[in-house]
Amino acid sequence: MARSLIKLAFLSCFCLSTLLFSHASDSILPNQSLPDGKFFVSSNGTFEMGFFSPDNSKKRFFGIWYKVISTGTVVWVANRDSPLNDTSGALTLTQDGNLIVLNTANGNVLWSSRFNYTSSIRNPVAQLLESGNLVIRDENDENPGNFLWQSFDHPSDTALPGMKMGKNLVTGLNRVLRSWKTSDDPSTGNYSFLLDSHGFPQFLLMGSGSVERFRSGPWNGKALSGTPRPNENMIYTFEFVFNQEEIYYTIQLINSSIFSRQVLSPTGILQRFSWNYRTQAWTTLTNSPADICDNYGICHGYGICDISINPVCSCLDKFKPQSEKDWASADWSGGCVRKTPLNCKNDGFVKYSGVKLPDTRNSWYNLSMNLEECEKMCLKDCYCMAYANIDIRGKGSGCLLWFEDLMDIKNRGESGQDIYISFQRTKG
Ligand SMILES: *[C@@H]1O[C@H](CO)[C@@H](O)[C@H](O)[C@H]1NC(C)=O
Ligand SMILES: *[C@@H]1O[C@H](CO)[C@@H](O)[C@H](O)[C@H]1NC(C)=O
Ligand SMILES: *[C@@H]1O[C@H](CO)[C@@H](O)[C@H](O)[C@H]1NC(C)=O
Ligand SMILES: *[C@@H]1O[C@H](CO)[C@@H](O)[C@H](O)[C@H]1NC(C)=O
Ligand SMILES: *[C@@H]1O[C@H](CO)[C@@H](O)[C@H](O)[C@H]1NC(C)=O
Ligand SMILES: *[C@@H]1O[C@H](CO)[C@@H](O)[C@H](O)[C@H]1NC(C)=O
Ligand SMILES: *[C@@H]1O[C@H](CO)[C@@H](O)[C@H](O)[C@H]1NC(C)=O
């Protein structure tokens, strides 16, 4: 095989250069540039990077896509909000370790990795890894912990296996997925998906104008409370990490040939796909929001959404619609209110099982408290609206307390968990 390639190469100089090029190039050195029309391929040929135009578009973007699969799905775009109008673009690594996309016709820099760091290194190299991660590192240092910059820390609309979706609490880096404007236009669209760490951490899918669209729910040891349990498939393993330094989830492929990716679509749906070799297309594994009850806060404060009931919204036990008239016409915007206000003397708790826990943005938590301590803690505070275990594995552990109106509760049946909601035991 190697010999026939060499023989072929001698047939023409052009052939020689392209063969050498496509064989050796996954890295770019200082002062080298990758012009429009040339490509770099990761070591085993899974990903490719270069300039491309989306379908029905003439604009030129620098990006990374799957090379091994027929659809060439794009997973990352550098200059998404400053495209070129012609093929005069090039990617260059500067002497001090900064990747830039520039317009060679006029020298304008359209995108720079330096937007997000200021340090430099002596012998920089930029390399497209087999994972689809484009990294800037020291030539002699392959330790991921020492990468100067990596595209996995600055995603476009796609999370790939090995990428940490979430936040570095030390540096403040939050990896946010941002949708494309349309399927033909990678420029920043209306939707974003990110970790929110006000209160107990959860992921939020936001629409334009910072309107919540979907909430993953907090991690409960088995799943993000509002999403399908992730570890019951043959395609990838799911890991959630929550410590002093980092909060993120990541997936690893079980078979490195069975690709999977998570994408925030231009219409605001967070989708996970896996590649189907037989149909040569992506199979949808999950969609979020998946149903009407996944629309953030559809039943408003103290409402609970149940997809198996029509209409879907009802008030929690011991609560009543704020406006019976609106509620009767399926206008849930007023939400529900207590039938009897809390009086801080003889309050108790109603237990709900099988729910997606409410919005945790104003919650308080302690990972080591047990359920009894948690109840005591909640009883002590007149503004405590509910409590729940954080981790539902085994006997359960941890304490989560809510101090604001309970928003975005969904009945999830067997996939849900328990919550205890405060009410006044006797009419006052
Ligand atoms: C890159 O270009 C600069 C300016 O022309 C030059 O000073 C430097 O030596 C070059 N570096 C390498 C590694 O070729
Ligand atoms: C590349 O492929 C070889 C052979 O299949 C495999 O042993 C190696 O682990 C792969 N490398 C990467 C980075 O995936
Ligand atoms: C591309 O064309 C648009 C519209 O004419 C212009 O606003 C933009 O500056 C051009 N971009 C570049 C990189 O030349
Ligand atoms: C750089 O970081 C800022 C603030 O964290 C962020 O708004 C911006 O999108 C980042 N830029 C890139 C190219 O990732
Ligand atoms: C991985 O998936 C590929 C493609 O379906 C298949 O050919 C291969 O046998 C699988 N490898 C393992 C170890 O299951
Ligand atoms: C994005 O938001 C704009 C303005 O709110 C709206 O006109 C447009 O239809 C939205 N696009 C999508 C795909 O939702
Ligand atoms: C969490 O609860 C444990 C057990 O009650 C206690 O020892 C610890 O100080 C609490 N931690 C915080 C941060 O409140």
Image (tube, rainbow, N blue to C red):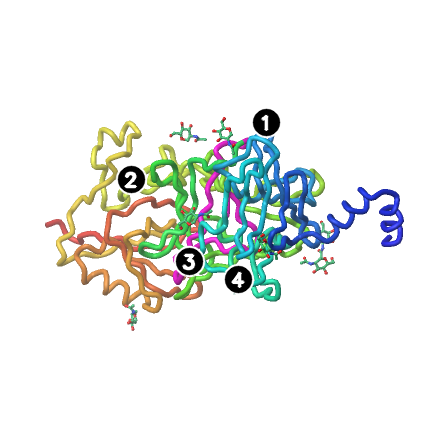
According to the image, label 2 marks what residue?
Answer: 300
**Please, is residue 238 above or below residue 83 in the view?**
below
Residue at 22% over, 29% down:
325
Q: Label the magenta part by its dominant secondary structure.
A: loop
Label 2 crowd bin: few (<14), some (14–19), many (20+), radius 10 Å: many
Q: Earlier in the sequence, mark 4 or mark 3?
A: 4
- Amino acid at the residue labelled 3: Asn
Q: Is residue 159 magenta?
A: yes
Name the residue furthest left: 428
Q: Which mark is residue 56?
A: 1
Q: CA distance from mark 2 to mark 4?
A: 52 Å
Nearest-to-viewer mark from 3 and 1: 1
Label 3 crowd bin: few (<14), some (14–19), many (20+), radius 10 Å: many
Nearest-to-viewer mark from 2 and 4: 4
* Left or right placement of residue 181 versus residue 252 in this view: left
Q: Earlier in the sequence, mark 2 or mark 4?
A: 4
Residue at 61% over, 39% down:
51
Q: Indicate the position of residue 360 as horizontal and vertical percent values.
A: 32, 52
- Amino acid at the residue labelled 1: Asn
Q: Earlier in the sequence, mark 4 or mark 1?
A: 1
According to the image, label 3 marks what residue?
Answer: 220
* Left or right placement of residue 90 versus residue 2 in this view: left
Q: Indicate the position of residue 271 as horizontal and vertical percent values.
A: 52, 42
* Left or right placement of residue 425 versus residue 138 in this view: left
Q: Earlier in the sequence, mark 3 or mark 1?
A: 1
Q: Which mark is residue 121?
A: 4
